[in-house]
Image (cartoon, rainbow, N blue to C red):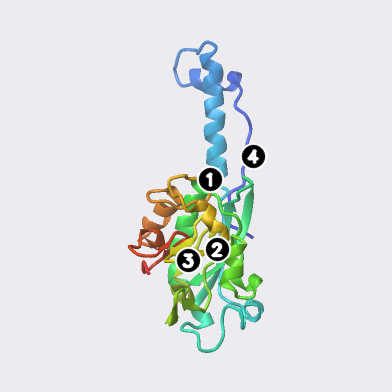
Amino acid sequence: MLVALVLAATACTPTQFQRWWTGRGNPPLAEPELSRAADGATRFWDEVIRRNRFGFEVSGIDAALAARMTPTSWRPGCPVSLSSLRYVRLTYVGFDGSEHTGELVVSASAVVPVVAAFRTMWNDRVPVERMQLVDDFGGSDDASMAANNTSAFNCRDAFGNPGAWSEHAYGRAIDINPVQNPYVGPGVITPAAGAAYLDRGDVRPGMLTSGSRGVTAFTSQGWGWGGAWSSAKDYQHVSSTGR
């Protein structure tokens, strides 16, 4: 079960707020100030309750998950063992504004910063389209990106650098909302639907831009962002090494 604090949200009525307010030695509030104060209190506590609904759970790679990952995202010869990886389930806000539970596989060393970053994104309502293991797409990075899937571990080469392991192959990188945050290099835009988001000044939901809440959620954990690279721009990519 996800670790979450579930509380019942109730509206604070003007009468309740007045009782609380005067009970602390303050003079009674008159309308419309009283109703505005009660509404503000309701919105404040609703947000406190919502933030406390963020939940996560972490586990090792059990036999069932190992079978699911082999040979799509992991196979013998990969640079890390399954025992060095962790399966993380966590809550996120979808593009529909609803609350969802997603899944990632990351390096054991990445669990703490990843959970902290996604907690910040939850708090700031940074939306994520979907969050599934790349194995649901046959291990295909292209298919995962086309589906606008946020994913982490995948034992594959670095994009455009055959023979060199990607940071994803170590579980040290995450691609977030690839359609809104495409990889852009000389003559290359991937996924293809990302062409609609080349104007990074036209900020829309799910985009990671310089100084945005989605980017700072990770950079505050010491991670790097591919949108800050000097040549090709990998706007979807965050990693513990900056590569």
Res 133 seen here: no
Q: Which percent across, then down, holds residue 56?
A: 56, 59
Q: First in sequence: mark 2 or mark 4?
A: 4
Q: In terms of secondary structure, where does tag 4 sit?
A: loop
Q: Whole-Å distance between the Cαs marked 3 and 1?
A: 39 Å
Asked if marks 4 and 3 touch (Cβ < 8 Å), the reply is no
Q: First in sequence: mark 3 or mark 1?
A: 1
Q: Give the labeled residue for mark 1.
A: 51
The kind of residue tagged 4 is: Ala
Q: Give the labeled residue for mark 2.
A: 191
The kind of residue tagged 3 is: Val
Q: First in sequence: mark 1 or mark 2?
A: 1
Which of label 1 and label 2 is nearer to you?
A: 2
Residue, x 32% and y 62% (percent of image)? 230
The kind of residue tagged 2 is: Pro
| Number of residues whose C-alpha sits closer than 10 Å to that of mark 4, classed few (under 14), some (14–19) or many (20 or more) | few
Residue, x 57% and y 30% (percent of image)? 42
Q: What label does residue 8 carry, if any?
A: 4
**In the depicted structure, whether residue 46 falls above or below residue 232:** above
Q: In terms of secondary structure, where does tag 2 sit?
A: loop
Asked if marks 1 and 2 touch (Cβ < 8 Å), the reply is no
Asked if marks 2 and 4 touch (Cβ < 8 Å), the reply is no
Q: Give the labeled residue for mark 3.
A: 188
Which of label 3 and label 2 is nearer to you?
A: 3
Q: Is residue 171 left or right of residue 66?
A: left
Which of label 4 and label 1 is nearer to you?
A: 1
* In-front residue for pair 185/105: 185
Q: Whole-Å distance between the Cαs marked 1 and 2?
A: 32 Å
Q: Which percent across, then down, holds residue 211?
A: 37, 49
Q: First in sequence: mark 4 or mark 3?
A: 4
Q: Whole-Å distance between the Cαs marked 4 and 1?
A: 13 Å
Q: Which percent across, then down, holds residue 170?
A: 46, 76
